[in-house]
Every structure is written in C-alpha cells, then in structure tokens.
Image (cartoon, grey):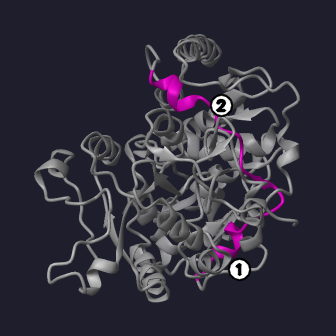
C-alpha cells in the first residue's frame, strides 16, 4: 500500500498536482512484462476521515497481504472534498472507492458518480443491513449505493462532581428538571466560576445538538424539523426546547459567551470543571481520553424529554460510508475490498479500537466496548434509532431568508415572539421544499403512518 496521505488545501491542487491514474488500471511494468508490478491491480481510495487513518492503513495492509495482486492507494482529503470529487469526475481522475457523506448520496447518484452495489452484494450480506438501510442515505430509487457502519449516539454529558455538590442525584429526566438543575449548579458553582449549562452555539449545529436528541426521544413524528407524517416542515416540534434554553439563559445558568462558543473550547471548559452539562455524541469519551484529559468525574445519560416520557427514539446520525465509483475500471476488485471493509471482523475491530460505535446489528451484538472510560453510556440502546432521510439539505439550498439555526439562536439569547418566528420558518422552508420538489431534487413524500415508536429496538434489545 502506498501511504499517500495528503491534505488538500484547495480544489485547484487536484488538477495542479500529479494525481496520475486515479481512475485505476493495472500498473504498467517499467522493467518488462515479467515485472511483479505489472500483475498488480491498483485501487485508489479517497477518504475525509483522519481520526481512523492509522487503523484503515493497517487494514489495507492486511488486505494486500491476503491479496498480493492488489495495491491500494489511500488519500486522506481535507478541504473542499465535494468540489474535489466533482473535479475528479469531470477530469476522468476519479478514485475507485470513495467515502461519502449522507447528504452527498442522492446528488452524486444523480450526477452519475456512484455505482450501485446491487449487482455485487450477496443476499447474506444484504440481510445484515436490512434494518438500517435508509432511502436517500443508502439507497436511491430502490438501489443500494452505500452502507452504514458507525453512528453518532447523542447523550446528555454531565459533571458528576457538580451535580453532587448541588444535591442532584440523577441527570434530568425532563426539560423542567434540566432548567432547575442548571440553576442549582450555577448557584453552588459561583465560588469556582462554574455554570449549569453550555452549548456550542457558534456552530451551525449548536442548537440541533440539543434539540434533536430531546425532541426525537420525546415525540414520534419526525426530526430535523420535518414531519414525516405530513411531508412538511414544522419547527414547532422544537418550541419547548427553545423555551427551556431561553429560560436557562434568562436565569443566568448558561455559561457566558455560549453564543460564540465552539465545541473544543466548550470541551476544554468542561474538562476544567466549569460546565455542569451539555449535549454531544459518542466521540466524547475518546476526546476526554486523548485531547482533553480530565480529572473530573463525568458521565452521560439518555437525553431528557419534554415531559419525562420516552415516546420516540433518540436520533442516531448514520447512513453512509463507502461507495464505488461508476468510472472505475476495476469494479470487481473495488467491490471485493469494500465487502471486506464491511465485514463483521473489520467492523468489530473498528468499534473495539475506539473509532466509532457500530450501527450494524450483527456487529453491535458481539463487539466489546472499547477500553475508553465512559463509552458504555454511548452504546446502542433500544431507545436509539436511525431515522429516514429528510429533505433538509436540499431545502436549505433553496431557502430565502434566515436559516432555522439563526432564528433559534436569536430567540435563545435575545428573546422575541417565538410563535411568530416558528410560523415564518414553516412558511419559508415549505416554500423552498416545493421548489426542490419541482426541480426533481427530492422525492421524499408524506408517510401518514410514520411513528418513531417503530424505531425502538431496531439497534439493540435493551
């Protein structure tokens, strides 16, 4: 394997650099027809993941050892990945195997970039994924283009020491308790400069990291502001969460500066014992083991709900991983490698190595928890579930006016007429959705019988 990891500073470097033979072919011999390299099939693999690159390199070396006729060149990309992929296909330099994000799948299928797995996948392999295949995340028009591997399992993360200091024995079960607990922690934390609650509201996903887990576990109709039953956006599903966060701000229980706080500075403050609770996903245990080692006692729990009742399923962000280029001239070889990467053996090693929590049922059932403190609280439960795709990304691309995250952040930190803002959001987002439908950008339709209750137990029995 060529360990050709490189960080792309700009899409223009793709053409300026020497990405020779990205659309793979058998390597040409330099020293005659008997040269060993002439018999090797070269595959090029692009990924945007840096955190697991050492593990993937190891697995590529193992695969090459099992298949001496295969040479795999992995490139770790950075900036402008989507644009780089566009340029690569336009210039006939596309990789054979590429990492895909959920939002890219329908677009890249429409552009003719991806090869369907349907002609390659065995019935046995397909059965391993049948409960986690999602339209417009894994499939388009009924055809499979990628499979999931890991997911983001969202939890409330809290400082046990501060909770105990405030006389709180358990994490909050509902929004009222969350608001009250934040107030209690802030009161007892004055001597050390600790606050009850914080969020990384600088990020476009700051509000979503809090609202999505709470609301999906509380309600049954949808996520990302999209009501699956009606096929329309209805941001009223987040009203209670926005009001609770506004109250935390008014009470003075929100860490000052949260409106401009990013996730790593938040983690640094949490590691120093300055934050009582916040929301994030299953990467956090690794963060506090390596990036922000801490002496505080911390734990994680399922999100609180609006009223304490767990009616739905906490949204797991998952859906896409590896795809095959339609332009590859080595599709059979590329598929064999993809198939091996999705095998239980490789995916079990991936989870046990601490690189992510698997959503593949056959893996989740047997894989051990990695040796990382706190990871147990992030493993799949019966109350976690992968939701169908929503048309959010496509819709926001056609939206006129302020995006939802800016509207909610403005209300949380400055107040205002929330009902009026919600009505305006619904009007503008549904108008943009109609434009996306008319352009053929999405075919997501209403599902009157949808209920996230059906997602309970889909990833774990307990």
Question: For mark 1, does the 10 Å Cα neighbourhood hold few (<14), some (14 to 19), or many (20 or more) residues?
Answer: some
Q: Quadrant of the N terminus?
A: bottom left
Q: Nearer the viewer, mark 2 or mark 1?
A: 1
Identified at 48% across, 34% down, the residue is: 107
> Looking at this view, is 282 or 15 the one in front?
15
Report the side of 245 relative to 205 (left or right): right
2 or 1: tag closer to the N-terminus: 2
Disc 2 from disc 1: Cα separation: 40 Å
Question: For mark 2, does the 10 Å Cα neighbourhood hold few (<14), some (14 to 19), or many (20 or more) residues?
Answer: some
Identified at 82% across, 41% down, the residue is: 452
Question: Residue 311 appears in which quarter of the rendering?
Answer: top right
Residue 92 % position (x, y)? 28, 46
Tell me the SS state at disc 2.
helix
Residue 250 % position (x, y)? 56, 35
Q: Which residues are magenta?
A: 372-397
User: Does residue 343 lie above or below 404 as drawn?
Assistant: below
Picture mark count = 2
Residue 122 % position (x, y)? 71, 63
User: Does residue 236 lie above or below 17 as drawn?
Assistant: above
Q: Is residue 221 visible?
A: yes
Tell me the SS state at disc 1.
loop
Q: Is residue 396 magenta?
A: yes
> Looking at this view, is 228 or 166 the one in front?
228
**Numbered badge on residue 243:** 2
> Looking at this view, is 164 or 121 the one in front?
121
- Residue annotated with mark 1: 367
> Looking at this view, is 203 or 245 the one in front?
203
User: Does residue 327 lie above or below 268 as drawn?
Assistant: above
Q: Is residue 1 visible?
A: no
Identified at 40% across, 55% down, the residue is: 328
Residue 450 % position (x, y)? 84, 33
């Amino acid at each position: 394997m060529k360990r050709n990891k490189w960080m792309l500073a700009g899409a223009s470097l793709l053409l300026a650099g020497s990405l020779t033979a990205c659309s793979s072919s058998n390597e040409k011999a330099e020293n005659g027809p008997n040269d060993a390299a002439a018999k090797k099939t070269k595959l090029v693999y692009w990924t945007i993941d840096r955190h697991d690159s050492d593990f993937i390199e190891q697995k590529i070396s193992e695969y090459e050892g099992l298949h001496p006729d295969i040479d795999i060149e992995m490139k770790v990309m950075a900036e402008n990945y989507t644009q780089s992929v566009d340029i690569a296909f336009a210039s006939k330099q596309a990789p054979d195997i590429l990492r895909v994000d959920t939002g890219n799948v329908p677009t890249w299928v429409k552009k003719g970039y991806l090869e369907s797995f349907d002609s390659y996948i065995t019935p046995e392999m397909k059965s391993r994924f049948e409960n986690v295949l999602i339209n417009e995340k894994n499939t388009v028009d009924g055809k499979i283009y990628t499979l999931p591997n890991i997911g983001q399992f969202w939890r409330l993360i809290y400082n046990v020491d501060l909770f105990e200091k405030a006389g709180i024995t358990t994490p909050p079960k509902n929004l009222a308790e969350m608001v009250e607990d934040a107030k209690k922690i802030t009161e007892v934390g004055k001597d050390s400069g600790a606050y009850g609650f914080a969020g990384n509201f600088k990020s476009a996903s700051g509000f979503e990291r809090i609202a999505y887990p709470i609301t999906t576990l509380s309600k049954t109709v949808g996520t990302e502001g999209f009501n699956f039953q009606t096929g329309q956006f209805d941001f009223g599903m987040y009203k209670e969460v926005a009001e609770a966060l506004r109250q935390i701000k008014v009470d003075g229980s929100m860490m000052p500066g949260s409106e401009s706080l990013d996730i790593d500075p938040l983690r640094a403050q949490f590691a120093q014992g300055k934050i009582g609770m916040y929301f994030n996903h299953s990467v956090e245990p690794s963060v506090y083991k390596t990036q922000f080692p801490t002496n505080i006692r911390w734990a994680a729990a399922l999100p609180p709900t609006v009223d304490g009742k767990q009616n739905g399923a906490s949204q797991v962000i998952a859906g896409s991983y590896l795809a095959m280029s339609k332009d590859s001239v080595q599709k059979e070889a590329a598929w064999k490698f993809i198939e091996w990467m999705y095998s239980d053996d490789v995916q079990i090693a991936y989870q046990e190595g601490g690189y992510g929590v698997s959503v593949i049922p056959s893996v989740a059932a047997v894989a051990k928890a990695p040796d990382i403190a706190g990871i147990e609280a992030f493993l799949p439960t019966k109350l976690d579930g992968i939701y169908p795709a929503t048309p959010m990304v496509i819709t926001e691309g056609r939206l006129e006016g302020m995006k939802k995250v800016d509207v909610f952040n403005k209300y949380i930190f400055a107040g205002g007429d929330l009902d009026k803002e919600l009505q305006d959001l619904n009007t503008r987002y549904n108008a943009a959705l109609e434009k996306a439908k008319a352009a053929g950008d999405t075919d997501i339709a209403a599902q009157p019988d949808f209920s996230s209750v059906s997602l309970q137990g889909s990833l774990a029995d307990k």
